[in-house]
């Protein structure tokens, strides 16, 4: 066992042992009232046998630690209504279960061959980590009785998410399908055309590129109030913010990409007597594709941020940014989290779609071929 | 002598940048006249002033109180008035608001960068942490994190934390991710050969870290810090929006948009832009000083 594994195994055993002794609840409930938790605690203590003298030692495979952590998570969450406000024992058992989960992942990775495991296993570790974050969140919020105006438990967010799909869909439509997608298409498209125009003039390249780089670092989001004033409260003003935000990253990257084709290849095109447009379409645009997709990926995130923040400056009574700011004001924090979950899913789906298109379009590029 | 000077000017970036800037300013004034004209014509019509000249119109559109698009000189006049002529402590001083935003930005940037470096080191030394966390760090960059800013502000206010810290936490949260990603890449950038060399020296993990991994990660650190400082300013500005426009550049933007004070919005915008430019330049300067002190060639890795 490595040092980290030893430490985790000790935390698991000691946490379970103390969890058996200390009160699980500040109320009346005790360990016998919640038999599954008691079983987890006993098994956790028994897992200390791995430190026993060689003749008494059990060979514990790593999935035993995994099973122990799942049992701990499920029993501790299921016991929450019984327990009410959690006591010291509950927290120690939670720590023990978490240590079991970490130990499981450590040992599984250590047991894996060096050219690491199947696809499913690669996915298992981060997913298990994510699930554990939710478990800890739920247990801490409900066990410690954190008021839901501060931080609602994930279960409450899930319930709210399921209950208000209508509102969330309307907001998604307003913000994402209208403002983000239209603004993204207009911003990236116009920047692409501008880049091709600039590319023909070295003078403009030298003048615009440093400025474009400079502007990319500026807090462009600040133009939101101005654009809301100009284009009104509805989605066109948000789309305009998205256009402004996505324009410069796309411009800078496309111009850099158009310069990426090598001198040799260009000479080859010249020996073929290829014209400007032929060279552009057959050589320089494909060579620029990795740069262009890089900008498209950066912009997919920027676009959503731009649209949501622009809604903080004024909007009709629908939209993700509007919902977030008003529900915060009404202290409906679970609705805010539901909206954030929608935004997170929308953002990462948008990004993944762009990545998939990139993989299909630049299949020849080393970064795609290698994995 | 003069020939050489003109050659350098022609090949350098200064002249093109100046020409483009001049074109932008001209465009700005053109749009200012065009966008402000309808209102001005309305005023003329109400005053029954039919004999206006084009030069009158241009002059008036560039000097409105609440123009649709304020002209450049109005914005800079406002900036001059609110920075130099107002005492720094006054609530109307742009310097005061910029300082409020800057302090949150810097505090957040320091916290975020520190945490990011620590997490990168953990990820480097523990495969379980690497495999569990790294996908989430990468995925979290595709999520509009800024959306949670108002909630963080209000919630922290509810538990009695207000002022600098909540904004700094948003900045820290935003600047944290580029630093983690950049530092993990940087700490892994030494080649196998170099790592093997450290092995043959019988160097401990600690020595390998400080003598090989850390120095080769420094260029990556500065690259990600440039991104982080810019984004942490955005975080501070957005963090100021939901607090009801108390102080800071974000509050100036919000107050300006409530009361239709376009000149104020534009001057806050320019102040924010200048702040961002100065911050990025400072990080770039530190980058150059550090890499020179470390004996790196001017164009290092990771840039």
Image (cartoon, coloured by chain):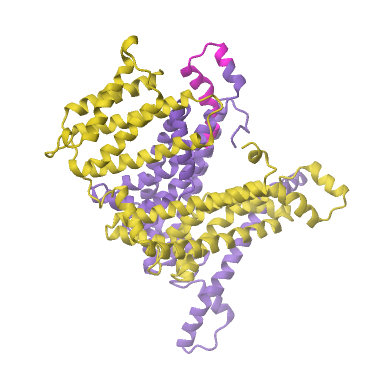
Residue A209 at x, y percent in the picture: 64, 51
Residue A130 at x, y percent in the picture: 40, 40
Q: Is residue B220 magenta?
A: yes
Q: Is residue B189 magenta?
A: no
The answer to whether any part of residue B89 appears in the image is: no
Work out which quarter of the rendered image holds the C terminus of chain A and state it: top right
Q: Is residue A235 above or below residue B98?
A: below
Residue sitting at 49 percent across and 50 percent down?
A348
Residue sitting at 40 percent across and 67 percent down?
A315
How many numbered callouts?
0
Q: Answer with left or right where residue A257 lies relative to residue B96.
A: right
Q: Nearer the viewer, residue A213 or A148?
A: A148
Q: Answer with left or right where residue B110 lies relative to residue B72.
A: left
> Magenta: predominant secondary structure element?
helix
The answer to whether any part of residue A180 appears in the image is: yes
Residue sitting at 54 percent across and 24 percent down?
A114
Give the magenta-colored segment's residue range: B197-222
Q: Residue furthest left?
A: A28
Q: Answer with left or right where residue A251 lies relative to residue B7.
A: left
Question: In which quarter of the view is residue B83 placed?
Answer: bottom left
Q: Is residue A324 above or below residue B193?
A: below
Q: Nearer the viewer, residue A246 or A128?
A: A128
The colour one sees for chain A in the rendered image is yellow
Work out which quarter of the rendered image holds the N terminus of chain A and state it: top left
Q: Nearer the viewer, residue B38 or A304?
A: A304
Residue A319 at x, y percent in the picture: 41, 64
Residue sitting at 33 percent across and 60 percent down?
A163
Chain coloured purple here? B
Residue A100 at x, y percent in the picture: 34, 28
């Amino acid at each position: 066992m490595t040092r980290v594994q030893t430490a985790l195994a000790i935390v698991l055993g000691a946490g379970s042992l103390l969890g058996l002794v200390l009160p699980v609840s500040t109320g009346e409930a005790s360990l016998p009232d919640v038999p599954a938790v008691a079983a987890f605690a006993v098994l956790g203590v028994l897992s200390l046998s791995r430190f026993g003298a060689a003749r008494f030692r059990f060979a514990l495979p790593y999935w035993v630690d995994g099973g122990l952590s799942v049992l701990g998570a499920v029993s501790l969450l299921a016991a929450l209504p019984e327990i009410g406000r959690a006591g010291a024992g509950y927290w120690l058992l939670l720590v023990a279960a978490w240590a079991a989960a970490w130990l499981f992942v450590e040992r599984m990775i250590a047991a894996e061959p060096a050219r690491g495991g199947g696809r499913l296993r690669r996915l298992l570790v981060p997913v298990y980590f994510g699930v554990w974050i939710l478990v800890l969140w739920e247990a801490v919020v409900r066990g410690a009785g954190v008021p839901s105006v501060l931080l609602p438990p994930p279960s409450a967010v899930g319930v709210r998410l399921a209950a208000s799909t209508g509102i969330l869909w309307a907001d998604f439509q307003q913000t994402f399908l209208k403002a983000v997608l239209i603004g993204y298409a207009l911003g990236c498209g116009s920047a692409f055309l501008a880049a091709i125009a600039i590319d023909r003039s070295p003078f403009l390249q030298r003048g615009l590129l440093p400025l474009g780089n400079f502007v990319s670092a500026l807090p462009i989001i600040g133009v939101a109030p101005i654009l809301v004033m100009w284009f009104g409260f509805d989605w066109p003003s948000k789309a305009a913010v998205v256009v402004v935000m996505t324009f410069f990253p796309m411009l800078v990257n496309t111009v850099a990409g158009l310069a990426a084709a090598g001198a040799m290849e260009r000479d080859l095109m010249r020996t073929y007597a290829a014209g400007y447009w032929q060279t552009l379409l057959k050589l320089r645009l494909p060579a620029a594709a990795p740069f262009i997709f890089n900008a498209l990926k950066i912009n997919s995130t920027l676009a959503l941020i731009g649209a949501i923040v622009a809604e903080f400056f004024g909007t009709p009574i629908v939209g993700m940014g509007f919902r977030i700011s008003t529900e915060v004001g009404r202290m409906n924090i679970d609705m805010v989290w539901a909206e954030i979950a929608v935004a997170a899913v929308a953002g990462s789906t948008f990004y993944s779609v762009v990545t998939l298109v990139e993989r299909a379009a630049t299949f020849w590029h080393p970064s795609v071929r290698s994995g | 002598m003069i020939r050489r000077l003109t050659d350098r000017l022609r090949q350098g970036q200064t002249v093109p940048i100046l020409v483009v800037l001049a074109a932008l300013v001209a465009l700005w004034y053109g749009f200012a006249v065009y966008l402000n004209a309808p209102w001005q014509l309305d005023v003329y019509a109400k005053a029954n002033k039919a004999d206006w000249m084009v030069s009158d119109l241009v002059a008036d559109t560039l000097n409105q109180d609440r123009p649709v698009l304020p002209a450049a000189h109005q914005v800079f006049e406002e900036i001059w008035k609110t920075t130099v002529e107002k005492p720094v402590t006054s609530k109307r001083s742009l310097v005061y608001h910029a300082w409020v935003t800057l302090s949150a930005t810097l505090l957040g940037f320091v916290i975020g960068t520190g945490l990011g470096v620590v997490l990168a080191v953990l990820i480097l030394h523990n495969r379980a942490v690497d495999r569990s966390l790294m996908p989430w760090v990468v995925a979290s960059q595709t999520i509009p994190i800024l959306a949670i800013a108002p909630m963080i502000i209000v919630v922290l206010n509810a538990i009695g934390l207000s002022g600098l810290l909540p904004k700094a936490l948003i900045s820290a949260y935003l600047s944290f991710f580029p630093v983690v990603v950049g530092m993990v890449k940087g700490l892994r950038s030494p080649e196998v050969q170099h790592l093997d060399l450290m092995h043959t020296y019988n160097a401990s993990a600690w020595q390998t870290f400080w003598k090989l991994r850390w120095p080769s990660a420094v260029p990556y650190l500065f690259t990600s810090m440039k991104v982080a400082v810019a984004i942490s300013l955005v975080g501070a500005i957005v963090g100021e929006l939901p607090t009801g426009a108390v102080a800071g550049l974000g509050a100036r933007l919000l107050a300006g948009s409530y009361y239709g004070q376009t000149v104020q919005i534009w001057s806050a915008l320019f102040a924010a832009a200048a702040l961002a430019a100065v911050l990025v330049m400072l990080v770039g300067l530190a980058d150059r000083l550090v890499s020179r002190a470390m004996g790196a060639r001017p164009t290092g890795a990771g840039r």
